Image (spheres, rainbow, N blue to C red):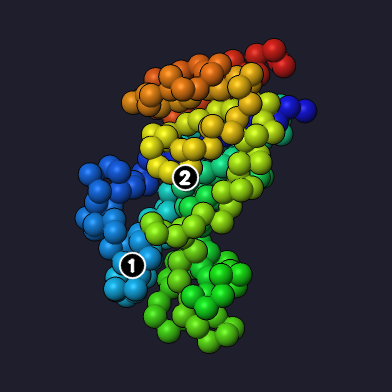
Amino acid sequence: MQKLVVLTGAGVSAESGLKTFRDAGGLWEGHDVMDVASIDGWHRNPALVLDFYNQRRQQALQAKPNRGHQLIAELEKYFEVIVITQNVDNLHEKAGSSAVIHLHGELFKCRSVADDKLIYDMDGWQLNQGDLCEKGAQLRPHIVWFGEAVPLLDRAICEVASADLIIIVGTSLKVYPAASLIQYAPDNIQKYIIDPNMPNVTHISNVHCFEKRGSEGMKAVYELLTSSSK
């Protein structure tokens, strides 16, 4: 079975009602992104950051996977599908995707400020000051903020490098290091890019562009990839 790697960004979740800071010129739900999505912001005002992500979890609990998420999951009938996402929500999992790499962390997990290896699943949406890990240290959102390393980047690079096909959907290819992943894809494999505002792809070989929203573009690519299998 061929390996299909799907790189997804905010454009996929936007159709489910989840916005990011790029929707408003550096503001995320009215906040300066560096106040709520940077390690410096956490050190300055942890209460603000905790409250901000509590609100994001409440919002995400109400969100449902859209047709784009569902089609990505349904491709598992035909391919070994690895989803590499910049999104921190769990909509890919809700849609049924079984192998998801969250480059920028996961909204419904938290971790210890004293030990990065102490990561916990969250039952609800609240994480507050005074919520401690087993070592007695404060818990923080399990999110990769500006100013922090991307722990799963090497794993993602390996998946891209061994892919037989690649779909890129809902990402501007401007946020690094995630945007650099396409550079590791084999030159000879087919690559499908879906975005209503098509990024510059002149540096990418064997690329097929679909200037559509995520769900519309995924429908077109899904039909193209599975037509020979039906």
Q: What residue would you read off at disc 2?
A: 177
Label 2 SS:
loop
Mark 2 or mark 1: whose residue is earlier in sequence = 1
- Seen in the picture, residue 156 relative to 58 is either above or below; the reply is above
Q: Nearer the viewer, residue 184 or 175?
A: 184
Q: Three-letter amino acid code at disc 2?
A: Pro
Residue beneath the point at 35% across and 61% down: 38
Q: CA distance from mark 2 to mark 1?
A: 19 Å
Residue beneath the point at 65% across and 14% down: 227
Residue beneath the point at 46% across and 22% down: 203
- Classify residue 148 by image quadrant: bottom left
Which quarter of the rendering shows the N terminus?
A: top right
Are dots 2 and 1 in contact, CB under 8 Å?
A: no
- Note whether residue 39 is visible: yes
Residue beneath the point at 60% across and 44% down: 156
- Classify residue 119 by image quadrant: bottom right
- Which residue sits furthest right? 1
Q: Mark 1: give few (<14), some (14-19) or many (20+) Cα within 10 Å.
A: some
Label 1 SS:
helix
Q: Mark 2: give few (<14), some (14-19) or many (20+) Cα within 10 Å.
A: few
Residue 18 location in percent, x, y? 37, 47
Q: Which mark is residue 190?
A: none
Q: What residue would you read off at disc 1?
A: 40
Q: Nearer the viewer, residue 33 or 50?
A: 33
- Classify residue 166 by image quadrant: top right
